[in-house]
Amino acid sequence: MFSKSINGGNGAGGGINIIGSETSFVTASLSSSQRALKYVHHSSQTVISVLVSTSKIKISESTQINLLYRLCLNHVLLFLCSAPRLDLDSPESGYHGLVKENETLVEVTPQIRAIGAKVCSFRIANKHHGEAPFEIVLKEKGMAELRALRVLNCEKRRNYKFDIEAVGCNGSLSENATVHITVVDVNEYAPQFLQPAYVSTVDEGRLYEEVVRVEASDRDCTPKFGDVCKYEILTADQPFIIDNEGAIRNTEPLDYERSHNYILSVVAYDCGMKQSAPAMVTVKVNRVCAPGWRGIPERVDYAAGVGSQPLLPSARLDLCDAPCILRNVRATLTLATDHIGKGCDRDTYGVRSQRKLCGASRDSVDLLPTPGPTTSWTASLSRDEGREADEIFEFDGVDSAAIVPNDVLEHTLAQKFTIGVWVKHRPRPRQDPHVKEHILCAADDHKMNRHHYALFIRNCRLILLLRRDFSEGDPNIFRPAEWRWKLTQVCDDKWHHYAVQVDFPHVTLFVDGEEWHTDEKNPEVIDDWPLHPAKGVNTTLVVGACWQGSDNKTKHHFRGYLAGLSVLVGRNEKPDVLSCLRRCQEGIHVPSMDLLQPGTQLLTNCDLTEVRIDGDNRTNVETLLRRIGYSNSRRFPTPGRRNFRLETTIVCEGSENNPLPVPTVQSYVTVLPPPRPGITVNGTGYVAREYADFRLGVRVFPDTRVTAGSAARLDACAVSVYPSLNPDHESLGLPGDALRRFRSITARVDRDGVVLSGADTPYNYQQLIRLIMYTNRKPAYYLDRVFKLTCSELSGRFASNEYVQTLAVIHPKEKTTALPHSTPDEPPIARILEPAPGHAQLSPHHADLPEEYATAALREVTIVAVACICFLLLMAVVGAARVRGAAKRRPSAGDELAAETEMAWDDSALAITVNPMERLTEHDPHHQSQRDEDVDDSASSDSEDGSYRDDDLDSSDCENDCELSNGRHRRHNSPHDLEWDHRDV
């Protein structure tokens, strides 16, 4: 009996134990599933079936050794011995890989890996579709990577499938696993159009759903890069669009006159946004003849100063051979200027300047002035200064109103007056027809709500209310009290000028400078009783609303814009003035009447904003239309756009009720900005004057020059002074007759300066500026005064430079007066009181001062010094003398300055006492030598000034030069003018 063990695996059941004995058994134990094995004995051809499943195998002893070796060598060792296997959860799922067209490394999921026995290589075991251009590269730890042998092409073959197996180092093989490879597409191709060019033909004047369709394709293998997702037209500013399907259509009707054909550059994009090469698309436009105007310009440019610019220089009416025997052609050209200023360009931008240019009465009261120190009631209103600084006031219809002070306008109007105003009414949609909107209203100031007179709008009617006072006429008689004009202009939201002329009981309305022609029903006149008496009740005048006395607030507010509201009491404005206020400086220039042929007529409106041509001769109508132009006579027109429109009606023989339709033509005029004018102010900027000149008055701008263009018309010049004038002794003014000579210019003078306003020439402004006078009664207070001058044109649109004028005050120089020499026989005081003989003026008249007199004068300086010291020692005596002298003194020129400056020395009661013993000390040698030294010093100090003039020092204006301590004295024309009161000595 023997025993031998062969281990073919790890763990229990992993091997077969064979035991030999008389009765031998071989027990095989396997952990795997049941298998059927066939063994063929080469000598006995015996087939032994072995069922291995924890069962016992009985082997006879005669074949024990032979069976053992055959089993181990041929089959059992191959099955039970170690072999590699692929690391897969499920062999049926296999591997899946992705490789890009431009790469060779395959991204495999899951990663290729072999476990079990040591692996020395991997190989492709089976090629399902005949080609597998891949290799498997072994890496460390049984791992491997899959690579393509060449760069693959998705467009040629997108998928590959093959089997792989691992090869152990002992030669054993793993089971096979299937690999699925997908080639990933790369966007390497751009779309290409199927045709290099496309051509289409369309008729003018139509909108097409599809003019032409373009198509492109892409050679990439996947929809992401192989499909075309977008088309685009590269040619800019063309009336065409293209959708994502390649369909091109027009966005507006095409016009053969504008362009005969259109060439478009179109590109395609795949879904990866790779752009194709452009393809050319040509769209040809067929002319479809329709009656209408040809040769109309898209825009007309107008420059200031060119006169008339033709609007339609190449206009031509084309009837397209229509079966029409022409009977009448009517062409109407309309120019729109309502958006410019208050309806159009006028002479100036300011209402006040326009009134002066038109000769309106200077007595008119402006109820909507520019806010200022004296016109503050309009400060709370919203102002729209417009395009060019025109003063326009906005009223919101809720609480905007201006209460006019009582001293501005007499609230009781006379029997004859005129009210003028610019109005742009903004009616509310679906407004109650009973709502009032007051432009001007005078009503009770408290207790009651009686309206004395008013101008207001209600239900698109302009209404004037004029109630008589109970004291005017018979209170028991009805008289006209309300006039109601029904006007389309009231509610059209455009600027209009209204002027109501009252010469009671006659009332006349002017609309835009033209008299409104009345009829039986328009205006509607309402009679009423006079107002009943009310004691102690006054009136309140309001612009833009009406005062509600019982509620103490405003009511019936106006909604819109107002400008230039004026009231003239006592007389009416002339009709030509009212027409001038509305006259425009821009409009349509009509051709000469000599061009009219029989059967043709030309009509215009009063504003020259519309012209109509009627005729049966098409050629003559075309000729007249080509000569129509736009003109603007302003030197500086408002820049911007003016639209114009041409409407045409054609009537054919036999079709009078069905006129031939002609499209309306629209274009516009562009007024170019004018060059800025040069307004220059210059002159001598520094002027010096003496005290007396300032007291009498000095011209501030004696030689100032104001220059501008030859056609310039200034409308304002402002003189400002800072700090403001002191009204106690300073003033600015103009001669009384100056403004009467320049009637178009008005002046406002206050402590801050002078404002001249009104449209006039630069020369007239220059003349008036030179007359401005500055007066100062106390010039000693000042060193100089600085004034600034600026002038402007067109309500400040163009302004001059800022000119600075300086007036300097010449202060008098202080002069040293030498005292005369006194002799021992004559008291020194006598020499002081009497003027020394021998005075002579110097350089002006070439006179000399005698040397003897000069020496004597120097000695007297010492006497004065000694006298002053004695004065201090005898203050008690002097005090008594000053009290007596104050009651007796006479006013002098120095007193005037002392009162003026409040700083000069009050020397009216000054008395000098001379010590009688002084004469005795004159013989003392010590005093004599000291006096000689003093004289020498004084002589040397006075020798610098060699001239003396009586008018060098104005004694009435000296401030601190009257002090004796400095050794200086004023000269006097007579002894009575001396400041010394020797009666008290």
Image (tube, rainbow, N blue to C red):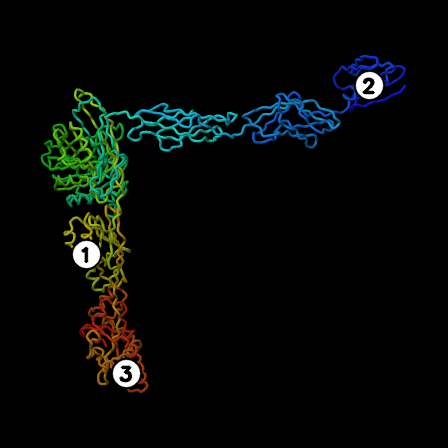
Give coordinates of residue 870: x percent, y percent.
Answer: 29, 78
Residue 405 seen in the current view: no
Name the side, left or right, on which 498 lies relative to 869: left
Q: Secondary structure at mark 3?
A: helix
Q: Earlier in the sequence, mark 1 or mark 2?
A: 2
**Percent coordinates x, y for residue 848 in the rendering:** 21, 78
Give the mark nearest the N terminus, 2 or 3: 2
- State the separation of the CA atoms marked 1 and 2: 148 Å
Tell me the crowding category of disc 2: few under 14, some 14 to 19, or many 20 or more residues within 10 angstroms, Cα based: some
Q: Is residue 273 visible?
A: yes
Residue 743, relative to residue 972: is it above or below? above
For numbered disc 1, what is the local secondary structure? Answer: loop
Examine the rendered structure and indicate whether residue 851 appears above or below residue 147: below
- Measured as percent of width and height from the top left, residue 428 is found at 26, 30
Q: Which residue is mark 1?
A: 771
Image quadrant of residue 88?
A: top right
Which quadrant holds residue 924?
bottom left
| Residue 261 left/right relative to 821 | right
Q: Nearer the viewer, residue 886 or 103?
A: 103
User: Given this view, does label 2 or label 3 mark the residue nearer the observer?
Assistant: 2
Task: Please tell me which of labels 3 and 1 falls first in the chain.
Answer: 1
On screen, residue 125 above or below 868: above
Looking at the picture, tell me which residue is in the foreground, 300 or 269.
Answer: 269
* Left or right of residue 219: residue 99: right
Calculate the distance from the C-alpha at mark 3 to the C-alpha at mark 1: 62 Å
How far apart marks 2 and 3 lie (CA) works out to 177 Å
Q: Identify the residue position indicated by label 2 in the image.
A: 70
Q: Residue at label 3?
A: 918
Tell me whether the residue at label 2 lies in contact with that at label 3, contact meaning CB atoms closer than 8 angstroms: no
Q: Quadrant of the image for the N terminus?
A: top right
The kind of residue tagged 1 is: Leu
